[in-house]
Image: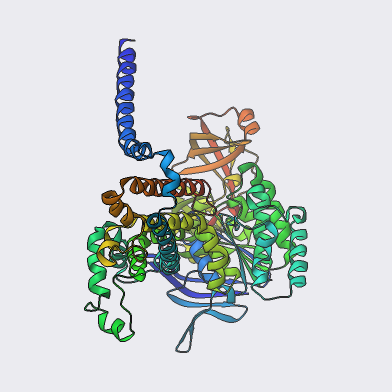
Amino acid sequence: MIKVESITKSFGEKKVIQNLNLEVKKNEIVTLLGPNGVGKTTLLNILSGLTRADDGNIYINDVLVNGKAGTKQVCLKPSERKVGYVFQTISLFPHMRIRDNVAYGLKSLHLPKQEVKKRTDTLLDFVGLREYAKFYPHQLSGGQKQRTALARSLATEPQVLLLDEPVSALDPQLRESFRLELKNYLQALKITVVYVTHNLSEAFIMSDRIAVMGNGRIEQIGSRTEIFDKPSSKYVAKFLGINAFKGKAVKIHGGLLEIEVNNVQLLAPSAPDLVGKNVIVTIKPENIVVSKSADLNFNSASCNSIEGTITEMVQMRSTAQVTVDAGFPLKTRLPLSSIKNLGINVGDKVYLCFNADALNVFADNSSE
Amino acid sequence: MKRTTANSFSNKIVILILALIVLTYLLFITLPILAVFLRINPSQVNGQLHNAQIIEAIKLSLYTSGIATLIALCLTVPTAYFMATRKFPGKAIVDTLIDLPIVMPPAVAGVALLYAFAPRGLLGPILNRLGLIIPGGTIAVILAQIFVASPFVLRSAKAGFENLDKDIINSAKILSGSRLRVFFTISLPLSARVIISGVMLTWARAMGEFGATLMFAGNLPGLTQTMPLAIYSLMNSDPLAGVMLSTVLIVISFTILIVIKLLEQKSFGAKK
C-alpha cells in the first residue's frame, strides 16, 4: 500500500509537485495519466527515492519512507524502499548478459549462489526469456528488452512496482501486443503498481484506478468509468477528449436540471444544489447521435436535440471526429460507415441528440 | 539551367580550395615526421640500440611515465566521478583549476612545482623533516609528469561519467544499496573505454614531458633524463642518436593514438 500525503517538489523556481495526495491500495494498479510535464515521472522518482520530496510524507506498506517522523527527517535510500522500477528508456545494463541483468539486484542481497541462480531462472521463465539468458541486451528485440527490465525489477521481490511509460520505447506495432502482455504479467504478480502513461487507451487497459494529473496535482482519481463518465474538472474532460463547456444552471424542470449554454437550453439530471450557479457540462462524444432530420426517434422527454453546423471532420482509421457548432463547439465520434450513410459533410446542418443522463454537470469554481 | 551550371562550378572551386588547404596542412604535419625518419641511417641503427644513454632514457621514461599514469589514474578517476555526479558551491572554480595544467606552459609548471616542493618551497619544511629532497630526483620527474599530464585522464573520465545514461545508474541504485558496487559494476565499466583513452593520452603526454621536468627535476642521465631531455642533450653531442630516440617517441605516440581511435569506436551505455 502507498500513502502520499501533501508532498511538494520544486526544481529551482519551478513547482513540479504541489500538495499532492494519493493512496494506492494493496495489489492495486493505479495509473498516473496526464500530458508531458505535469510531474508524473517526478512523482515516481519521489516514490522510488531517486528524488527527495521537499515536503510531505510518503508511506509504503505503513513504513515512512520520506517525510517527518516527529522532528526527525526521514528519507530512505531507493534500495531500502522495496520498490521495483521499470524506466521508460528500458535502461538494461548493456555490458551484462540478460542473466546478469536480472540477477543484479539479487547479488546485492548476498544470497547463496544457488539461490541467486534459482530465483533468476524463475524470473527468466516468468518473462519467457530463459533461452536468451546468455544474450546481451543489444541482441534482443524491444519487447524482450522490456521483459528483461521487468524481470530485473522484480528480482528483489519489491512490494511496489513503478512503471514509467514502459511501452513508449517500443515500436508502434509492438506496443499494442506488449500492453496486453504486460497486463497479464501484472495481474499474475499480484503486486501494488503505479503505472505512468500519457496514453488513454493504455491507462484504460492497465489500471484498476486512474489518477489524472495536471500541474503537479492529482486532478481526479477513480475507476475507468468514474473518470470517463464523470470528469470532475474541465481539465480532466479536455484531456480525456470529452466535450466540456460552461453554462448556467437555470431551474429544475420536470425532474431535470435546465442549463443554458450560449442561449441553448439543455436538460441534465436533476441537481437542485446547482440551480443559479455557473456550471461545467461534460458529455462524451460517443453519446451524441447525429441526424440530418430533427424528428429522431427519441421519444423521451429527457432527450436533448440541438441544431448545428459541421465545422470540421477529422478522419481516423475506422471513425471520424465530427465537430459541430451548436452555439458552442461539440465533438462527436462516428463510424466512417455512418458518415457515409448519413451523407454528411463540412458545412452541413445537422441535429445532435443526446439523453439528459449523458450529461455530467458540476459547479464551475474557476475564476475564468 | 545557367544558374545550375554556375552553382556546380562554384561548388567544384570550393572543393578544390578545401582540398588544397587540407593537403597543405597534412604536409605541414607529416613533413617534419618524415624528415626525422629520413635522417635515420639503417646501417647505424644497430649500434644506436646499444647506446647506453638512449637505453637509460627509454627505461626511465617508461618507468616514470608508467608510475605517473598509474598515480594519475588513481587520483583522477574518483575526482572525476565526484565532479561529474555532485553539485557543490564553487564547482566551476574547481573545474577550471583542475584544467589549469593543460594550458599552463610546462616551464611555468616546473617553476610552480619547484616553489612547492623545493627545500625552501611551500612544503619544504615538512619534506625536510621527513628527509625527502624531491627536486633533482626521479620522484620530481614523476611529480612533473603527473602535474602536466593528469588533466587528460581526468577530463576523459569526467566526460565518461557525465555521459552515462542516468536511468541505467538509477536502475542500479534501486537494485543495489551500495554506491561502491554501483560504481564498480556499472559506472566504471561503462566509462572504461573513455577512461582508457584518457589514460593513453596521459601516458603519451607524460612520456613527452620536457619543460616542467627540466625546470623541476633537471637533466641528469640515469636519474632524471627522460627521452625528451635525452633528445635535447643528444642533438648537441650525437644528433643521430637524438634522431633515433625521436623516432621511438613518434612511433609510441602514433600507436597510442591508434589505440585511442579503436577504443572510441565503441562505447557502451552512453547517453543517446
Residue B68 screen position, x and y as percent:
41, 65
**Within the image, what quadrant is residue B185 found in?**
bottom right
Residue A305 screen position, x and y as percent:
55, 43
| Residue B245 horizontal side relative to residue B218, left or right | right
| Residue B87 horizontal side relative to residue A7, left or right | left
**Within the image, what quadrant is residue A248 found in?**
bottom left
| Residue B136 horizontal side relative to residue A334, left or right | left
**Residue that sits furthest to the top in the current view:** B1
Q: Nearer the viewer, residue B185 or B41?
A: B41
Label tally = 0
Residue B223 screen position, x and y as percent:
35, 66
Q: Residue at x 47, y 77 (%)?
A: A56
**Within the image, what quadrant is residue B19 found in?**
top left
The quarter of the image holding the N terminus of chain A is bottom right
Q: Nearer the viewer, residue A90 or B179?
A: B179
| Residue B12 horizontal side relative to residue A299, left or right | left
Q: Is residue A127 visible?
A: yes
Residue B166 screen position, x and y as percent:
50, 60
The quarter of the image holding the C terminus of chain A is bottom left
**Residue that sits furthest to the bottom in the current view:** A70
Relative to A176, say whether A49 is above or below: below
Relative to B104, say whether A314 is above or below: above
Q: Nearer the viewer, residue B122 or A113?
A: B122
Is the image coloured rainbow, by chain, by secondary structure, or in one colour? rainbow
Q: Is residue A22 visible?
A: no
